[in-house]
């Protein structure tokens, strides 16, 4: 700890206050000839009983900054998905899912609501950065292997199910945002009715 940090620390402030009490005792004659020991002892006692310094909280990006980074990652994901060849049914589901995710990530009222709910940002981030890329990549790799060993369960069926589950999760998120706005509107109506 640097000297300037110690001078501003809680320990130094508490010790200084106790040392001033010791000086007061000296001027009133209570400390007697041992006043330097009394002042130093009270300063030390004050410094020992002072609460320790709390480290500063880490400066994490707020959810709106996280959404901005997530938009960039979503564009990268879209570019990746454009290069992948999928069966028609899975491609249709993927298009619906990416449109939903894109709508949730578009700047505007939905993004403002998302920025107020870190858990929703986490769900959306997990879908964009982990679940969707992994589902498509696993399909691409598994499809190659099933060509070598036919007769097993179709990787297309797994991909369609995964995309359906991700679509349902996104729809639940959109429904929660819509319900938040509906509650906000209802509470504003009640406020205006109560005021009238």
Image: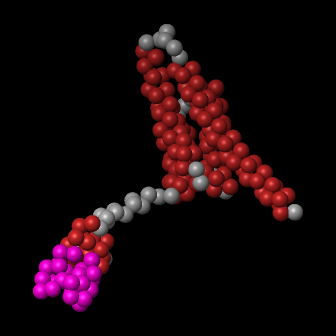
Q: Which residue sits at x=47%, y=38%? A: 130
Q: Position of residue 122 (x, y in %)?
A: 52, 45
Q: Nearer the viewer, residue 179 or 44?
A: 44
Give the residue furthest to the right.
196
**Which of the 4 quarters of the picture holds residue 112?**
bottom right
Give the residue furthest to the left.
33
Q: Position of residue 180 (x, y in %)?
A: 69, 48
Is residue 25 rendered magenta in the image?
Answer: yes
Judged left or right of residue 161, residue 59 is: left
Judged left or right of residue 16, residue 180 is: right
Q: Position of residue 89 (x, y in %)?
A: 64, 26
Q: Is residue 14 visible?
A: yes
Specify the segment rendered in magenta.
Answer: 18-42
Q: Position of residue 115 (x, y in %)?
A: 58, 54
Give the residue furthest to the bottom.
27
Q: Is residue 97 visible?
A: no
**Which of the 4 quarters of the picture holds residue 1?**
bottom left
Q: Which residue sits at x=81%, y=55%? A: 190
Q: Nearer the viewer, residue 52 or 84?
A: 52
Classified by dominant secondary structure, the portion drawn in magenta counts as helix
Q: Which residue sits at x=17%, y=79%? A: 38
Q: Which residue sits at x=23%, y=90%? A: 27
The answer to whether 74 is drawn above or below residue 61 in the figure is above
The answer to whether 118 is drawn above or below residue 55 in the figure is above
Q: Nearer the viewer, residue 127 or 90?
A: 127
């Amino acid at each position: 700890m640097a000297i300037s940090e110690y001078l501003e620390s809680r320990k130094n402030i508490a010790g200084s206050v106790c040392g001033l009490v010791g000086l007061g005792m000296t001027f009133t004659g209570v400390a007697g000839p041992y006043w330097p020991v009394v002042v130093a002892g009270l300063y030390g006692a004050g410094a020992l009983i002072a609460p320790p310094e709390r480290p500063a909280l880490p400066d994490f990006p707020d959810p709106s900054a996280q959404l901005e980074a997530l938009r960039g990652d979503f564009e990268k994901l879209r570019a990746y998905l454009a290069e992948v060849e999928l069966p028609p049914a899975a491609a249709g589901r993927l298009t619906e899912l990416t449109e939903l995710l894109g709508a949730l990530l578009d700047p505007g009222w939905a993004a403002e609501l998302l920025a107020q709910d870190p858990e929703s940002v986490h769900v959306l981030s997990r879908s964009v950065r982990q679940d969707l890329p992994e589902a498509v990549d696993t399909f691409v790799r598994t499809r190659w292997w099933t060509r070598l060993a036919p007769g097993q369960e179709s990787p297309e069926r797994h991909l369609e199910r995964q995309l359906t589950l991700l679509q349902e999760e996104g729809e639940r998120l959109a429904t929660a945002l819509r319900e938040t706005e509906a509650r906000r509107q209802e509470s504003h109506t009640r406020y205006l009715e109560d005021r009238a």
